[in-house]
């Protein structure tokens, strides 16, 4: 069992005013308790989280707390987007522009397939569009507990 954590989960967890905060809090607690098995995220997600947190909070404490959760919790492994994942994501953007997924979203989907991670912890329903594609049909999105 393994799960990939998307940007919105981390943002919701750290932002008490976020509409998804209660659910994100439950999900992160579940990750820390090992309820999803091994948990993963990526350097691109970390970048999105830091950029959003910096822009919205301007709080060094929250920024460092977020980085610490991702890199030092002992429960979340940080995957890196390598050349082949980058190339696969770029190809997906070019082949499926009408799906309107971000480049980071395409890297997530490709990392999940490459690393055999079946579960995506995400509030982004855009990922549900991937179910009809053979390559990504094994990805199951969970948005709540």
Image (cartoon, rainbow, N blue to C red):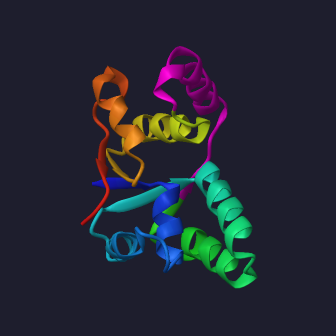
Q: Quadrant of the N terminus?
A: bottom left
Image spot of residue 130 (x, y percent): 36, 30
Relative to 97, residue 58 above or below: below
Left or right relative to 47: residue 75: left
Image spot of residue 2 (x, y percent): 33, 54
Q: Which residue lies furthest to the bottom in this view?
A: 61
Image spot of residue 110 (x, y percent): 48, 34
Please name the predominant secondary structure of the magenta segment in the image.
helix
- Residue at point 46% right, 56% down? 40
Is residue 82 shown in magenta? yes
Relative to 120, residue 21 above or below: below
Left or right relative to 119: residue 112: right
Question: Toward which corner of the image does residue 122 lie, by quadrant?
Answer: bottom left
- Residue at point 59% right, 69% down? 71
Image spot of residue 89 (x, y percent): 57, 28
Is residue 98 shown in magenta? yes
User: Does the rendering let one see residue 13?
Assistant: yes
Q: Quadrant of the C terminus?
A: bottom left
User: Does the rendering let one see residue 74?
Assistant: no
Residues rendered magenta in the picture: 78-100
Q: Which residue lies furthest to the top in this view?
A: 95
- Residue at point 31% right, 73% down? 30
Left or right relative to 125: residue 65: right
Q: Residue furthest left?
A: 145
Pick the residue in front: 76 or 107.
Answer: 107
Pick the residue in front: 45 or 13.
Answer: 13
- Residue at point 51% right, 30% down? 100
Question: Toward which corner of the image does residue 59 lie, by quadrant?
Answer: bottom right
């Amino acid at each position: 069992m393994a799960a990939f954590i998307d940007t919105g989960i981390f943002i919701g967890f750290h932002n008490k005013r976020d509409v998804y905060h209660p659910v994100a809090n439950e999900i992160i607690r579940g990750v820390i308790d090992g309820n999803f098995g091994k948990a993963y995220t990526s350097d691109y997600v970390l970048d999105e989280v830091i950029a959003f947190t910096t822009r919205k909070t301007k709080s060094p404490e929250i920024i460092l707390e977020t980085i610490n959760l991702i890199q030092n919790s002992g429960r979340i492994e940080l995957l890196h987007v390598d050349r082949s994942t980058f190339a696969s994501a770029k190809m997906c953007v070019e082949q499926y522009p009408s799906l309107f997924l971000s480049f980071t979203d395409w890297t997530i989907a490709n990392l999940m397939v490459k690393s055999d991670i079946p579960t995506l912890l995400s509030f982004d329903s855009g990922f549900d569009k991937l179910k009809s594609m053979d390559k990504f049909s094994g990805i199951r999105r969970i948005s709540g507990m």
